Image (tube, coloured by chain):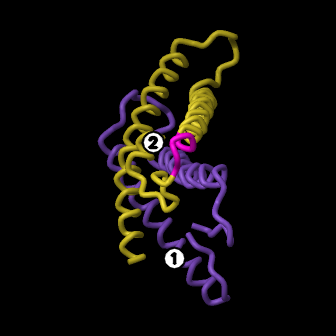
Chain colours: A yellow, B purple
Amino acid sequence: MDSLRAQQNLTSSPNSLTVSEQRELEQRLQKRQVKEFMSLFGNLVDNCFTACVDDFTSKALSGREGGCIQRCVAKSMTTQTRLSERFAELNQAMTAEMQNKRF
Amino acid sequence: MFGFGARAPTSAEKVAAVENELKVVAEMHTRMVKICSLKCVDKTYREGELSKGEAVCLDRCAAKFFEAHAKISDHLQQQSAQQGGGFGM
């Protein structure tokens, strides 16, 4: 969320917020960030488990399943990072274009 | 963005407005990641790294996602303008 904030041209300008309002906003955004991370984590577990685990002849993860999960996590993180970069670029371009259309 | 009426917005409303705008953007981000991962990444996870093909696919998917978003936004605005009354996106 920090990267989103950095390059977001908001119509409701945060610069018009008082110091205490800005602090309130910071707190809210922090809470939001924690929630986002938790749901990211949850989705990762669900996703990688579903994709990798299908052998229930044992109650322990097999070596194959463990390796798959490791690769799944690594790949998911790389994907997230790459898409976040693309998103920031595209969002900035879109916002700039929207400003131009307005004026 | 939406207009708060005749009186000035309260402190809580101002903070909420900024938070909401960021929320909308964050949600779009989450949706895009989910959909483009589905479309581009091999689900068998034979490799722990993105292949070149997958990486390029993700880049293009993101770009198309944004374009589709803009197009749909325009369509909706046109439609609602025809029917009278704005929607505002």
Residue at 48% from the left image edge and 44% from the top image edge: B37
Chain to which the residue tagged by mark 2 belongs: B
> For the stretch drawn in magenta, what is the main secondary structure?
helix
Residue that label 2 marks: B41
Q: Are marks 2 and 1 in contact (CB under 8 Å)?
A: no
Query: Mark 2 vs mark 1: which is more N-terminal?
Result: 2
Query: Hey, which quadrant is residue A99 in on the image?
Result: bottom left
Question: Is residue A47 something that shows in the picture?
Answer: no
Foreground residue, A2 or A79? Answer: A2
Image quadrant in which the C terminus of chain B is located: bottom right
Q: Is residue B7 above or below residue A4?
A: below
Identify the secondary structure beneath mark 2. Answer: loop
Tell me if mark 1 has few (under 14), some (14-19) or many (20+) residues whose alpha carbon lies within 10 angstroms of its own.
Answer: some
Tell me the amino acid under the disc marked 1: Asp
Tell me if mark 2 has few (under 14), some (14-19) or many (20+) residues whose alpha carbon lies within 10 angstroms of its own.
Answer: some
Range covered by the magenta-colored residues? A17-22
Q: Is residue B82 left or right of residue B52?
A: right
Residue that label 1 marks: B74
The picture places residue B39, in percent across and down from the top left corner, at 49, 50
